[in-house]
Image: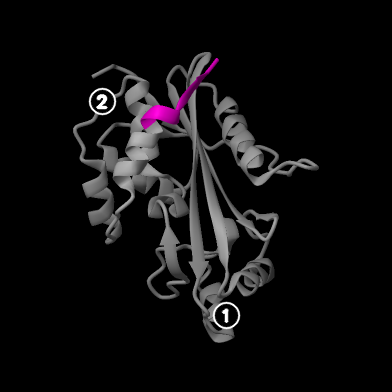
Amino acid sequence: MKELKLVLASASPRRRELLGLFGLPFTCQSADIDETINNGETPLAYVQRLAKEKNEAVQADALVLSADTIVAFEGGVMGKPADASDAAGMLDAMRGKPHQVFTALYLRENHHALADCCETRVVMRPYTDEEIAAYIASGDYQDKAGGYAIQHKGFHPVQSVEGCYANVMGLPLCHLFCLLRQAGLQTNADIPALCQRHLEIQCEVFPGILARCEADSRVVI
């Protein structure tokens, strides 16, 4: 195994939880940046830029991993809600409708980096106003793109998912597996099996994701 320190440029407990499945030692360092979207910026360009800027905000003699997750809905971008009212509005707008979740990954050691992005199509179920209110009252909406957590057992807001489930939580594990391997970090963890067991899901897309990631992930200098 390559002897590299791994730093997660995030304070997200969900990302820490998912990264822990790899069995690799890592530390966390929060990266605070301006997340204002630029005029004319597409959701894909926006999320990729934020992941890169978060990474570059962390200065460490280590392999630095950053990620950013957004919800793209009806031509716009939904980031983290400003408050409870904002979160309720997001959930109301998306009720019974599809949206896309993008997570961009950026892995850097000194001036060499690897980047990738994952997209998942999500359809929300037709939850009621009362369910929205109860979820908002729980406070779980905070710090979550689109104002929801797919894994919340009380609200369970999602009707169907096409693509990577972990991506909607903020860290597409098979995409990350490919990046870490390209960076020289080897793990004996069976990530598809661990992901499905940990998240209590059945995943049919991981073979294609692993094959596609190996072909498409690129080095950025």
Q: How is the image coloured?
A: one colour
Of the pair 192 and 151, the residue shown nearer to us: 192
Left or right? Give the position of 3 relative to 169.
left
For the residue pair 82 and 73, the one nearer the viewer reads as: 73
**80 or 194: nearer the eye?**
194
Indicate left or right for 119 with 175 as reference: right
Mark 2 lies on residue: 186
Circle 1 packing at 10 Å, graded few (<14), some (14-19), many (20+), is: few
Disc 1 designates what residue? 133
Whether residue 123 is visible here, answered yes or no, is yes
Residue 220 highlighted magenta (yes or no)? yes
Residue 218 appears left or right of 176: right
Residue 182: in magenta span: no
Q: Earlier in the sequence, mark 2 or mark 1?
A: 1
Q: Write the residue at 29% across / 60% down.
A: 201
In this rendering, is residue 106 above or below 117? above
In the structure shown, which secondary structural element does the residue marked by tag 1 occupy?
Answer: helix
- Where is residue 113 shown, x and y percent of the image? 49, 21
Boundaries of the magenta span: 214-221
Q: Quadrant of residue 161?
A: bottom left
Q: Position of residue 123 (x, y in %)?
A: 50, 67
For numbered disc 2, what is the local secondary structure? loop
Q: Amino acid at mark 1?
A: Ala
Is 145 placed above or below 215 here?
below
Residue 200 picture location, percent across and down: 27, 61
| Up-down relation of residue 70 to residue 137 (above or below) | above
Which amino acid does the dot numbered 2 rest on? Gln
Residue 9 visible to the viewer: no
